[in-house]
Amino acid sequence: MMMVLEERPAHVSMAQACRALGVNRSTVYAWRKRQDKRPTESSSSRRHSPQPRALSAKERAQMLEIAHSEPYRDQPVYEIYHDLLQQGIYLGSLSSWYRQLREAKESGDRRPQRAPQHHAMPRITARAANEAWTWDISKLPTMRRGHYLNLYVVLDLYSRFIVAWMVSHKENAALAQQLFQEAVDRYGIPQGALTLHQDRGSPMIARSYLDLMGELGVTCSHSRPRVSNDNPFSESQFKTSKYQPDYPGRFESIAHARQWYSTYVDWYNLQHHHSGLAGFTPEQVYTGRYQAIAQVRQRALDESFEAHPERFIQGRPAVAMPPASVSINPVQPDDDDPSPYSVVNFPTLTAASNTAAKSTLIFKDLSESG
């Protein structure tokens, strides 16, 4: 049909011929375009003909022979090319050298490369104070441009209570060892009772630091490389501190930083109504005093309900309690079989309950001298 259209009489237009044959003109134009792009025998032979500027087989063999010779067999292509060039020998461009060795499959890595590492996701669950701690180091800018102080903060995972902190000029494993040696002694942590989570900074993976943790019976857990949310509780605490209205932004000296953080830690532990703890303070959860405080809250809610029950459309209110367990990377449960390791529970305490836990608040500012 297309040949009929091409061989139509001169007085018959393309539109008339297409209407007579029932063919769309766009179909004809598309067919013509495909015919124009189809390679002819002469063009195909030209495309596969040797490039006149290409290296000859003898020249390519000479390049490989030199690359295999004793002086150059262990050298990269870049070294071979420039060493020959400074001797006044030019056999081809640098890209030609790479091309010849690549075609000979001799341009790859000489030594076996380490395979990609797969790190297990850290999973930690705490159901009581001093079962798991998490810590990190944050940089504190000073008035001197480019000079930073280092803030070490150790957080109890279950209660978010800051158990120890330190401000230092340096960030190293020796200070980390001092921090945890004193913290474990101060809180009387028994062997094998504590899990310590951290990221992979140089102080956290130093051999001397890990050896000390082994001697203290502390189980170490590490975040995965380049995963920003494997240590969320420490990161959240740092954000809380740096978003305080009176945060200096830049500190005048290490004494200024220690003074400010001492005041902040007192507020954070003793006065901060933590959203992750149902509005209780870290100290109240750490010491167990939240049980008695929950009774006071419940009585206030009960009195308000008795006076105005119509204001509580969901019925009698109950005080929300801190989570029974706190996890880093909790296991996600199946819909049909929820797991206690992955479900965050918020038990309630009624006004009839009268149990209250009593404990002594222990806190120490760990800061090295100098």
Image (cartoon, rainbow, N blue to C red):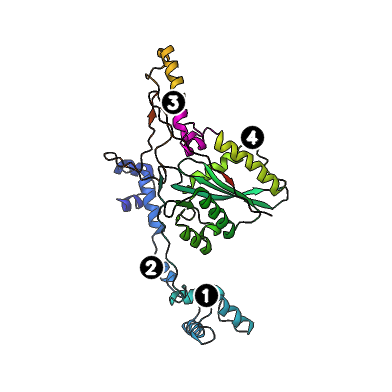
Q: Are marks 4 and 1 in contact (CB under 8 Å)?
A: no
* N-terminal label among 3 and 2: 2
- Alpha-carbon span between mark 2 and mark 1: 30 Å
Q: What's under tag 3, amino acid-wise?
A: Gln
Which tag is nearer the camera, tag 2 or tag 4?
4
Residue 322, given in percent of the width and then of the height, sits at: 43, 34
Which tag is nearer the camera, tag 3 or tag 4?
3
State which quadrant residue 263 falls in. top right
Q: Is 184 above or below relative to 310?
A: below
Q: What's under tag 1, amino acid-wise?
A: Ser
Position of the C terminus, as image quadrant, is bottom right
Q: Are marks 3 and 1 in contact (CB under 8 Å)?
A: no
State which quadrant residue 34 falls in. bottom left
Magenta stretch, overall SS: helix
Task: Please tell me how crowded label 3 is: few (under 14), some (14-19), or many (20+) other residues with Cα within 10 Å.
Answer: many
Task: Please tell me how crowded label 4 is: few (under 14), some (14-19), or many (20+) other residues with Cα within 10 Å.
Answer: few
The residue pinned by badge 4 equals 245
Which mark is on residue 41? 2
